[in-house]
Structures are given as structure tokens and as C-alpha cells.
Amino acid sequence: MGNINHKESFVSKYIFTYDHKMISKQFLITAIVMGILGVSMSILFRLQLGWPGESFAILETFLGKWAPGGVLDRNAYLALVTIHGTIMVFFVLTAGLSGTFSNLLIPLQIGARDMASGFLNMLSYWFFVISCVVMVFSLFVEGGAASGGWTIYPPLSALPQAMPGSGMGMTLWLLSMTLFVVSSLLGSLNYIVTIINLRTKGLSMTRLPLTIWAFFVTAILGVLSFPVLVSAIVLLLMDRMMGTAFYLSDIFIGGEALDATGGSPILYQHLFWFLGHPEVYIVLLPALGISSEVIATNSRKPIFGYKAMVGSIIAIGFLSFIVWAHHMFVTGMNPFLGSVFVFTTLLIAIPSAVKAFNYITTLWRGNIRLTPAMLFSIGLVSTFVTGGLTGIILADSALDVTVHDTYFVVGHFHIVMGLSAIFGMFAGVYHWFSKMFGRMMNTKMGYVHFWFTIVCGYGVFFPMHFVGLAGAPRRYYDSTSFDFLDSVADLQPIISTFAIVGALAQLVFLFNFFYSIFRGQPATQNPWKSNTLEWTTPVEHIHGNWPGALPEVHRWAYDYSNPAHDEDFVLQTTPLKDGEVGH
Amino acid sequence: MNALIFGFSYKYRYNKNRKAHFFPHDTRLEVIWTVIPSIVLAVIIIYGLQTWSEMTGQASDDSLRVELYSKQFDWTARYAGDNDEFGSTNFNLITPLNPLGIVTQEGIDQALLKIEDKIAKLNGELSVEKGHLLAEKVELERSLHPSDDHGHSDHDDAHHEMSEGYKNNLETRLSAIDDLLDSGTSKVMTDAAYEAKEDKIYRLKRHRQRILELKNYEVGEALDAWEIGKDDRIVKSEFHLPIGREIEFVFRSRDVLHSAFMPHFRAQMNTVPGLPTRFKIETTITTDSMRTILDNPDFNYILLCNKVCGSAHFNMQMTIVVETQEKYDAWLSEQKVYMAEKN
């Protein structure tokens, strides 16, 4: 890797680049574009949910036949709900989060010139782009996009005659997700190999920053679980196109008894959730990793219980593989199997609780700089705890039966996985923006962005728990006809209002982001006075990261306010003083 | 917890003259907050699993069994007749007159008849397709007058060898085709439409085959198995339950996944095509008492669909009425008996 500072063409520098820093920015900007789409979709269906049947003339102007007379069409509603979920979970929070920060931070924080394979890294990004394009394109085909919910359970998704969205739209959904999995696997393998092989001298696994630990476990989860989604998808495609019956049996639809016998729709659910649950942690762990780093740096304290933090990341990763069927308590699965999954699911609360307590203890008696990144990290801990507690209710099969597939679930996972992960992503962007673009983001706009986002975030998703407890099912186009929901009907317009305000607040972020890329205050080399290796690289990006030799590491990443030193931070490259006990 | 998070963040906010407390780990504290959640969770698990096994356990022998059947986009309830047993069902037998596909000799014959009708109708449509008729006409004319174009010996021989009877057949067919073409009953169909109909006939024949297998199935001693379903009662839009009974619900689905959700009973179970599911509840408060309690004369218990199943998913509901045993018995006796109208 001696090729530092050579001339590159525009195409090899900005488009088909091998450089992890540029690929990281590509992932981030693509994810922002997808995020804008995903959030806009949620606003469209929140309009319908907040004010059912109300005509918004502007909708017809923009959406045409999706909103005849200014009221969202019921099939378009289901398509939007489905694609919103898919985009947010996979394209924004999986690829956007891991793709951006694993790519940026792994080589920089472990002292490597680049990823193990720059070529695979580039392929990973471009597969992601193609998959995004296919997914967005699927909105415009005949019958509309996939509409069976982001989990696309068969037989609804297997039978084109079951609903309009199960035609071409569903085929494209499956194609897009297959491409996405290819992208994810290429990325994850690369991250794993890089972390194992390319750590610089002195950087043992026990000295790794928690970000890297989180990315490492996340990548392992991805490699082990995404292929199972592909098998589920392939079997579904065969059921759709080749007349097999993996998921189909005893079906009479459209006036016709189908030939299929012997398949089971529940098989699909097992396969889907074998990915689907680890996926929650694929989304969450990188956010927790980022917040660990940001909280320690800005509290000017070592992260409390480093070994316990690493242990709980690994424990969460392991347990995430044996809890999937808690999504299936009411599918008709054997109740005894349900009991086993109640047990394993509740076990996962223990490492999660350890993490939450450790964060709080890290804050305790710290010297806390409330930067926007820090605020978002603190917000993450808050949503992680709040959402985690409602998770305990859902994990208990006897309680889950009453709130399964209601707004309670919607509120729960949006807080614990949606808000937490997106807060982690924002924290990462504010914290490492200077590393990406060489300039600083505006702090005041960051504060405005944070407070609107957290207040609106809770404003949207907290009342949903009450709506759900009252028994309101999710994915209903209109539930005004049910008297028993009258008591919570007033909450819906409030939720929608918070959603709209919260979405508008993201414009502040977008402006700040793009403005700062070009006009932000120029960054210094180590603006947050941080210990980790990425802050020893020059502000100006160079291929190969460090101009001279690779840095050598002498200590762990968390020597903040170490009493043996005068400064409240000690770079990992600082050799131990005489008599100082290293970590 | 949230108070601690934001409280600490405020209390320990930055002061450049202060240095943070260096506190990297403390085994005692960490053990405490590992052990306490473990104990709390153990308690939750034990209580939760007890309730769970009560909910999902075997129903007692004197419980009332009610079948709920889902399809896009409504529910049907079924009660066993006097024999206290549900007739067996088969999805191949579903017709408008037999929406649940209950297996009876009459049901089988009726379903077969229905399929024969459909096949005949499709064959009829295919037989008047103009393009195919014209093609057949050309073919027939060539067989009848092969020498016109080529005028040589081989064909003449073949022509002469054609039997009179066969030739007559061809001519009859030819004139039938001419009649069809002249009378205007012939229709033009695209190739795709023609093939779709052929395909449909193929599938209907497969369907017929499956019913015939059922019809010829050797039931042996259990010959009366196909009688059981005759007195089942089938109910739409509203179903009733007696108070103070254990009710065991059995769920079936015709097309896609649905979910039987009874928010007031805090009960929910998916309905799965090909896999009957179940749960049990016990009714404790009648609809009337609940109306008094809530001071709402319009109150009703309700059954909803809670698994997205298509465009009208949000409107797939059924009213549940809980009432005294006497009222329930009276109501049930008025409900439609499956085979009654045909006897």
C-alpha cells in the first residue's frame, strides 16, 4: 500500500472508488437520500391515519392516482407502509449506518491503510445502489410496490391474485433485497477480515475502541443471518414462479383451489425472523458502539466497565440468534416452543441492562461536554432504555397475545430500534463530520435539530403505546369505524402533527449537513480531544490515511482524565510513562 | 432511568477547571446490576410462562368449540350440530353454497358439477375462437382437396384411400365451421387469452382430479364421517357465545394469513391456510352487563383481522355477542343448518 498521494481520475476518485473514506461518504449520502424518501412516505400515511378520509388537494397533485381526490388510496397506503419499513430498516439503518461508519472508522481506528479489499468494498456500495434503485422503481410498476408489510408474509406475498402489490412489485422487492444481501455480505466479510488482520502494532483486541467491537459483532451477525433471508426469498420466488409449494398449502383464492399442498407459511416466518431478529441488533449495535465512543469522549471519562461492555455486545450478538420466534407467538407455532423463546428473549434483557447501567455510570461525575453528538448519544441511551422496557412486555408471550401487531409494537420498535439507531447515526455524523469532510457542523443548528427530534420522536411513538393498549391494530388504513377505539382516536392527529414537525426539523439537519460540507468552519486535527487513532490522521484526506509509518498503539482507547496525566485525554499512541500500568 | 440519564448529563456538564472522575470499572457495582435484572426477569419468566401454559393448554371436555374461518375479507363462524362434532373439511370442495368446504357426499357431487360446468363453458369459448376456426378450416380444406395446388400422384393416392365415412366427418366439421363463422358467434381472442383459458382448463381438471380422489377415497368403517358435517351451523357477520363457559376456538383460513383478534378478550391467534390453530377463553361478562358497566348502549365485543391480508384488511370484522345460555341456545337453533336447504 505504498501508493500514497497519486493522481486519480474523477471516476476512480468519486464514483468507482476503492478508498474507504470516500465509500463511507457515498453510503452516507445514499442513505440520506433513502431516508428522505422513507420519512416522506411515513408523512403521507400519517396524514391518512391522523385525519382519515380528509382530502388534502396537494396529495392528488403530487401523487396522482395514488391519492384520488386528495385521499390516499388504500392500496397505496399499504404499499407506502411496506416500502417505508423496508427502506428504513434495510437501506437507512443497516446499510446507511454500518456502511458509513464501519467503512470510515474501521481502518482509521485500527490503524490500517484501507479495507482488506478495496474492490469488494466498492462492489458492496454499488450493489447497494442498484438495490436502492430497484426498490424505488418498484413503486411505479403495475399494481404498485410490495404491500404485504415489510415482513412480506406468504401466502399474501406469494400469490399475485391476493392483492395488487403482490405482482410485479413483489418480484422487484425480492430482487432488490437479494442485491441488498449481496452488498451486505461483501461489506461484512470485508469488515471482519480487516478487523482481524489489519490492526496496527500494539492494538490488541482488548484495546479496541467499542465502536470497532460493535462493528465487528454486527458484521458477524450479518454474515450469519442474511444468507438465511436469501434462502427464504429464493423459496418464495420459486413458489411464485415455478409452482413449488414451500409456503403454500390448502389455498382457495380467486374462485380457484390451488394445486399447492404440504407447504407451510410458518416456515417462511422462521426463516425470515432468523434474519429479522439479528437484524434488529445489526441496526442497533453500531449505534451503541458509536454512542459508547461519543459518551466516553464527551464525558471525559473512560467508558465504565469496558470488559462488561464488550462482553454484553458479544452476549447480545449470540442471544440474538436464539430469540427469533418471539415474533411468532400467535402464529399457531407450538406453545411449548413459544415458552422456550420467552426464556431466551428475556435473557437478552440482562446484557442490555448492563449496557444501560454502564452508560449511566460513565456519565456519573463526568465532565460532560454537551455537543450535538453527545446529546444524540444521551438520547440514544434514553430511547434504548424506554424501548427496552416495553420490549419486556412483548417478550412475555402471555402479554404479547394482547398487543401483538398493535400500535404498541409499532411504538416499541420505533423507539428502541428506529430512534435509537437513527440517534446513533446522527451522533456519528456530528462527531465524525470533521473526519469526513474536514469541516465542522454548526453546533447551534445541531441543538435545534436534537431537541426537536427527541421531543417529536417521543411525541410520535410514546402515545402509540396507549393506542396499542386500547387494541388498535397496525397497518389499518382507517380505524374510525370501531367504537372501542374512540378513547384514543384523539391521539392520532397529535401523533401525526409530531411526525410532521419532527420531519420538518430534519430539514435543519440537511441544511446544516450540506452547508457545512462547503462552508463549515475548517476542522482542527483533533477537535474533540479524543484518544483514538483516527484523530492522528491529517485533516486533509490522503489515500493510505497516514502520511508516514502506521501509528503504534501503547494503551487502550479510554484513558480520559487519567490521574497519571495532566491533560484529560491521552492519545492511544502515547507510550506508557514510567511506572504507569497499561490497559 | 431517563431521569438519571438527563439528570447526570445536566449535573456534570462541562467545566474546564474540573477533571472528570477516573472510574473505569467496579466489579461490585457491575455484579449488582447484572444480578438484580436477572432476578426480576426470572420472576417475570415464571409468572409469564404459567399464564401462557394456562392459555394454551388443553380445553376441557365440556367446553364449547367454535370454528372461526377467515377469507379475504370476512369471517365465518361454525358451530357443531347435535352430534357435537365438526364435519371434516377440504378446500377443494369450496363453492358458493359450501363456503367452508365441508365434506359430504352431496358437497362432493356439487363441487364436481360446478367444475364440469366451468370446463364446459371454457371449452365452449375456445371452440368459437375465430383465428383457430379459420386455421382449422384451411387445414380441413387442404385434407379434402390436396391436389389443387400440387396435382400429382402421391397425394392423389392418399386422397383416394380416404374412407367415405372419414371424408364425411371432415365435411360436416367444415360446414359447421362455416356456419359458426357466418352466424357471427365466433369471437376473436388474443393468443395470450386463448392460452390462459387453456391453462385454466388444465387447472380445473387437476382440481377435478383431486375431488375425484376424495370421492373414491376408501373411508371404510368410518363411512358416516361424511355425514357429520351435515348438521353444522354456519354463521356470518355476528356470532354468539354463552356466558360462563370455556370456549375453544379453532381457526382456519381459506386464502392468506389472517389473525383473529378479540381486543376485549385480550386474545389473538393467526389463522393459517393448511394449519388449523386454536386457543381457549372463558366468557365472564355478557354484552348486556358490559353495556351497563360502560354506560354505552351501543357497546359490542368484536372480532378483527390483525394480520395484513389485502386492501380491505382494515374492515374485516365480526360482532361477538355474549349472552346467557338460554338466549344462546335460542339463537343457535335459529341459525342456518348447512345441508338443511338442500334436503
Image (cartoon, rainbow, N blue to C red):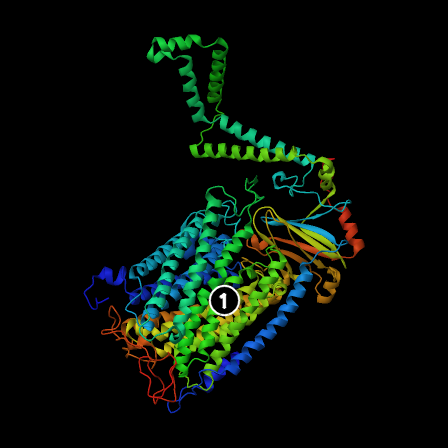
Tell me if A161 is positioned left or right of B283 in this view.
left
Chain of the residue under label 1: A
Can you give x and y, in whole percent of width and height, for residue A64 in the image? 42, 53
Residue at (62%, 35%) from the top-left corner?
B211
Q: Quadrant of residue A250?
A: top right
Q: Is residue A55 visible?
A: no
Task: Give x and y (percent) for residue B263.
Answer: 64, 61
Residue A393 as seen in the image, left or right of residue B282 = left
Q: Nearer the viewer, residue A88 or A269?
A: A269
**Residue B178 place in picture, x, y as percent:** 46, 18
Of residues A339 and B160, the one nearer the viewer is: A339
Depth order, front residue of A574/A154: A574
Rendered location of residue B196, percent (x, y): 47, 35
> Which residue position holds label 1?
A414
Q: Secondary structure at mark 1?
A: helix
Residue type at tag 1: His
Q: Residue at x 68, y 42 (%)?
A: B88
Question: Is residue A196 visible from the viewing direction of this image?
Answer: yes
Q: Which quadrant holds the C terminus of chain B?
A: top right
Q: Is residue B205 above or below residue A408?
A: above
Q: Residue furthest right?
A: B326
Instruction: Bin the neighbour count of mark 1 within 10 Å (Cα to Cα): few under 14, some 14-19, many 20 and up.
Output: many
In the rendered image, the residue lying farthest to the bottom is B17
Q: Residue furthest front?
A: A579
